Image: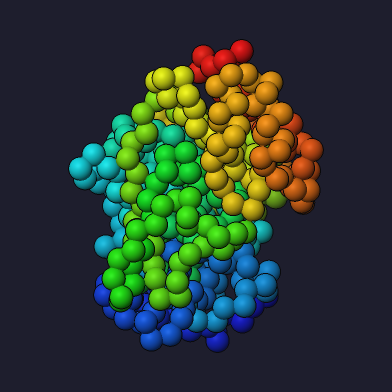
């Protein structure tokens, strides 16, 4: 299967029904994408496919043929990372890659709570996470 | 993943003709957004081993208005329905229901056709399609078949879809009147529906009602609709006879009936119905 991963063309040998999550972690060696629930509930495995946030645990790799996939590694240097760090928006941190990827796809003006409705965090209580994303909305440096 | 994915057979047709030819040869489970499929695969409860990927079939995508009817391709996602100016104009009830499904990640994957064919009574697009009396357009190598929504489901998670057929599109004549929708679940996002109501207040004062998650299939409730024209209390009584909610892991029959009655009363109050 050939697709674009974080801006670079990749070709992987994998069964067509293998989950994109497992291909990214095992074949491509990018372990920033986490498996939480494995059933589309928690959003820890969120990646972008053609710019749209999706749960990579629910995507067969065959369905990203020719598409652009962006993982948390592809968002290196994204201003959201600095904001999450500044707000202390992580405790155990397991949900954070998915949170950042989902937040990066937030439409201008969209309620951060709605943009992150598909991402669960069991530690922080969300307050600092929402603050980090709201900062982004206000365009603070 | 509890199921071995390496033994699963996936055909990846490039267009609708190729897909229908493959289905005419041998049955395969069609794959759309896979949001339900991988839950079953991960749990190890999926029996199917041969699949047909619909993701390259552009013939099944898109939203158009033709001869006053809204035509929505089966592979159109909930996110596309939620954001479509055409749907917002012609059938806002459907857009509202789509907007409350799952979270953004699920709405970008889940499709209209998947919601129909999966056939869950908690399918959130089904109450709006039921009240609007949509038409389901099926296609196979044998030709096209048009099925009225009320004839599409034959029982719990069972439809008239033949093994060699795909849902191509859904057609809806924009319903006249004021639409009303409310979904009740454990929380606003990512929750499977305990009870939903899509309703339309027609200009003459009559109404249409379709509840989700209160029976094996999602249908209109004609006796309750007739009763509601006269009295909310009477309609609430009749509703208890007309729907068949069950106890399951998400809720109880008693709670579902109480909530269904309350939703109907709220609809009546908010759209200026009978006292």
Quadrant of residue B187 within the rendered picture: top right
Q: Residue at x 39, y 67 (%)?
A: B166
Quadrant in which the C terminus of chain A is drawn: top left
Say if residue A76 shows up in the picture: no
Q: Residue at x 37, y 82 (%)?
A: B24
Quadrant of residue A62 within the rendered picture: bottom left
Q: Residue furthest left?
A: B67
Left or right of residue A37, residue B130 in this image: left
Left or right of residue A92, residue B68 in this image: left
Question: Which is nearer the eye, B102 or B167?
Answer: B167
Q: x, y percentage for residue B163?
A: 45, 75
Quadrant in which the N terminus of chain A is drawn: bottom left
Q: x, y percentage for residue B64?
A: 25, 46
Question: Which is nearer the eye, A97 or A62?
Answer: A62
Q: Residue at x 56, y 47 (%)?
A: B218
Question: Which is nearer the eye, B148 or A25?
Answer: B148
Q: Residue at x 47, y 38 (%)?
A: B131
Q: x, y percentage for residue B123?
A: 55, 50
Q: x, y percentage for residue B41?
A: 61, 71
Say if residue B15 shows up in the picture: yes
Left or right of residue A96, residue B16 in this image: left
Question: Which is nearer the eye, B121 or A137?
Answer: B121
Left or right of residue A117, residue B195 in this image: right
Residue A49, placed above or below residue B44: above
């Amino acid at each position: 299967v050939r697709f674009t991963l974080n801006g670079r063309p990749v070709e992987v040998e994998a069964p067509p029904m293998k989950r994109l999550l497992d291909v990214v972690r095992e074949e491509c060696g990018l372990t920033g994408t986490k498996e939480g629930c494995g059933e589309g509930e928690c959003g820890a495995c969120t990646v972008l496919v053609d710019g749209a946030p999706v749960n990579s645990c629910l995507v067969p790799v065959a369905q990203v043929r020719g598409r652009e996939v962006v993982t948390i590694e592809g968002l290196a240097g994204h201003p959201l990372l600095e904001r999450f760090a500044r707000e202390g928006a992580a405790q155990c941190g397991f949900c954070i890659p998915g949170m950042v990827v989902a937040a990066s796809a937030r439409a201008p003006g969209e309620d951060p709570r709605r943009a992150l409705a598909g991402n669960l965090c069991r530690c922080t209580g969300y307050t600092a996470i929402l603050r980090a994303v709201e900062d982004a909305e206000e365009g603070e440096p | 993943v509890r199921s071995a994915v390496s033994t699963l057979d996936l055909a990846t047709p490039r267009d609708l003709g190729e897909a229908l030819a493959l289905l005419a040869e041998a049955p395969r489970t069609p794959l759309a957004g896979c949001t339900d499929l991988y839950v079953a695969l991960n749990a190890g409860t999926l029996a199917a081993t041969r699949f047909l990927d619909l993701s390259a079939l552009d013939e099944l995508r898109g939203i158009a208005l033709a001869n006053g009817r809204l035509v929505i391709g089966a592979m159109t996602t909930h996110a596309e329905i939620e954001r479509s100016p055409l749907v917002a104009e012609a059938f806002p009830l459907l857009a509202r229901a789509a907007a409350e499904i799952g979270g953004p990640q699920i709405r970008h994957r889940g499709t209209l056709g998947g919601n129909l064919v999966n056939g869950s009574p908690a399918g959130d697009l089904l109450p709006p399609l039921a009240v609007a009396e949509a038409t389901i357009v099926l296609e196979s190598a044998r030709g096209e078949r048009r099925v009225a929504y009320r004839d599409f489901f034959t029982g719990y998670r069972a439809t008239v879809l033949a093994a060699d057929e795909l849902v191509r599109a859904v057609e809806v004549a924009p319903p006249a009147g004021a639409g009303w929708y409310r979904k009740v679940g454990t929380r606003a996002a990512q929750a499977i529906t305990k009870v939903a109501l899509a309703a339309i207040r027609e200009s003459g004062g009559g109404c249409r009602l379709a509840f989700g998650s209160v029976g094996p299939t999602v249908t209109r409730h004609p006796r309750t609709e007739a009763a509601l024209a006269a009295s909310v209390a009477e309609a609430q009584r009749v509703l208890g006879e007309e729907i068949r909610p069950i106890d399951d892991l998400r809720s109880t029959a008693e709670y579902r009936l109480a909530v269904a009655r309350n939703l109907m009363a709220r609809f009546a109050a908010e759209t200026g119905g009978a006292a």
